[in-house]
Image (tube, grey):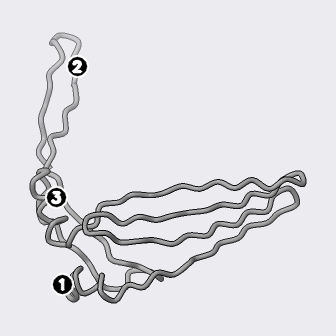
Amino acid sequence: MGMSDASRRKELKREVAIDTYENDKLRLVRMATSKLTRTQWLVFMHYLIGTDGDIKHVQEIHKMLAADYEDYIEAFNLAGYKKAIFYEEDLWPQSRGLFIAIKQQTLIYEAAWPAFAPTVFGIRS
């Protein structure tokens, strides 16, 4: 699985990211930074929105669970998912990995024939 989350946390440094967008009616700037606590990943976002000669400031905080990969896999298993795995390799630019899990489910549908009452079939996938 590679580097543990504890190792990753030690090498994290706080940076400020910036994104901008502009058209004829709108100018938008988003600046963000994050902080990792023991159990939460906090992302602080600040927006400057310029329209009609005015500037508005909006902020939001995203609070996400920060757990080790093994904890996520265990959570998938407890929720009824099977074969939960984590792909760490670069799947796309700036990829941080991908969890994949399969959930066993029953597909239910009705089939009605003119002479019979509706019948329910269960199919396991």
Q: Is residue 50 above or below residue 73?
A: above
Q: Which quarter of the picture shows residue 20? A: bottom right
**Residue 110, relative to residue 28: is it above or below?**
above
Three-letter amino acid code of the residue under disc 2: Ala
Residue 88 location (% of width, % of height): 28, 82
Task: Residue 58: give x, y in percent of width and height.
Answer: 64, 54
From the image, tell me which residue sits under label 2: 112
Q: Which residue is mark 1?
A: 1
Q: Position of residue 36 (x, y in %)?
A: 35, 72
Foreground residue among 26 and 9: 9
- Residue type of the residue flagged with mark 3: Phe
Residue that mark 3 sits on: 76
Q: Relative to the observer, which residue lies in front, 104 or 87?
A: 87
Along the line of sight, the residue nearer the viewer: 120 or 115: 120
Query: With respect to residue 57, does 33 lie above or below?
Result: below
Q: Residue at the location (20% across, 72% down)?
A: 68
State the CA–CA distance, disc 3 to disc 2. Answer: 37 Å
Residue located 69% across and 56% down the image:
57
Q: Quadrant of residue 92?
A: bottom left
Image point (17%, 53%), residue name: 103
Q: Seen in the image, is 9 located left or right of residue 4?
A: right
Label 1, label 2: how far apart the Cα atoms are: 50 Å
